[in-house]
Amino acid sequence: MSLLQDISRLLGGEDKAAQGRLQEDLLTSLLIMAWMVEARDPYTGGHLWRVSRFSRLLAADAGLPEAEVARIAIGGFLHDLGKISVPDHILGKKDRLTEQEYEIIKTHPEVGWRLLAEHPLAGLAEAALRAHHETPDGSGYPRGLAGLEVPLDARIVGICDAFDAMTSTRPYRRGMAVDKALAIIEENLARQFDRDFGLRFVALGRAGGLDHVVGHSDLGIPLHACAMCGAALVLKRGQGSGERVYCRSCAGEYLTELRDGRPVPVATGGMGTASDLEPEADTALIAGFVRESARALLVA
């Protein structure tokens, strides 16, 4: 019996519509929590959405059932929950991490699982969350799993997470070209990346099947770099002209302009206050994600 079926049983006489609303509310609560964790790092804007979208594309390309595709996409969105425990000075460090700092980074999969474990939908993301840094050759963390010991969800999310990290700008480097990142994945098949899923991902990328996701924070919404510090400015679908946007790294202020129907940030030279910098989840994006995922996961 699945977790969602367990919820149905516990609800007893509640109708299916009520069950569906509860499931969607539970999933929404997890996605908002993940969004707020991501907001701590001003250079990773949109990372969770991109990893989730890449994971959905790869799982679908592999011919997995719709419910598995949806579950893997959810795992992709939630995989970095454990970074709530990583200090800001490590997340934003521009220099090479010390051995001690890297050991702290390596705790985030299990921290994330402890944070999630008692949630009713925890099982949907457990594999991706705990094992997305495990590798086929056993050199990954936190448990040193190898080969098929690494769960399917984690084999997919791990590839997508690494690809997005390589192609995204970080405090210490610019994002690399898609072709270069795909070549690195190809060179490390069966060592760092699952061979079968890795080959599929490389083929998808070389066919242009990932281009609409790379460097975006939503479909059709490209990331913009802060003109003052280079951190990611994440805009939202539906934003109009004249809306204020603030860099969460340097507090620089921007006003949006619509160009070809898309919001574009224009620097004002002003600075945001503490209240301006409070993170706010993209509830429209999350609602769309929930609708897309719930169709395949609702209790029958």
Image (tube, helix red, strand yellow):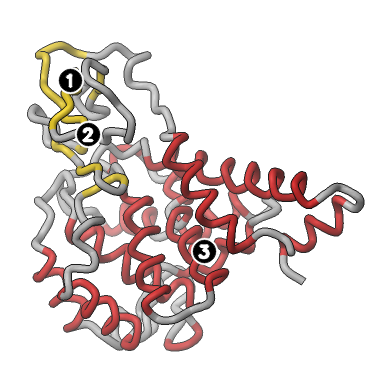
The answer to which of 135 and 243 lies nearer the viewer is 243
Q: Earlier in the sequence, mark 2 or mark 1?
A: 2
Local SS, label 3: helix
- Give me the residue at 13% from left, 77% from top: 183
The answer to which of 286 and 91 lies nearer the viewer is 286
Distance from label 3 to label 2 (Cα)?
A: 28 Å
Mark 1 closeness class: few <14, some 14–19, many ≥20 residues within 10 Å: many
User: What residue is shown with label 1?
Assistant: 254
In the picture, measured across the screen, residue 39 lies left or right of residue 31, that is left
Local SS, label 2: strand
User: What residue is shown with label 2?
Assistant: 233
Q: Position of residue 93 (x, y in %)?
A: 21, 43
Distance from label 2 to label 1 (Cα)?
A: 9 Å
Q: Mark 1: which amino acid?
A: Tyr
Q: Position of residue 157 (x, y in %)?
A: 40, 67
**174 to 60, vertically: above or below:** above
**20 to 235, vertically: above or below:** below
Residue 163, picture quadrant: bottom left
Distance from label 3 to label 1 (Cα)?
A: 35 Å
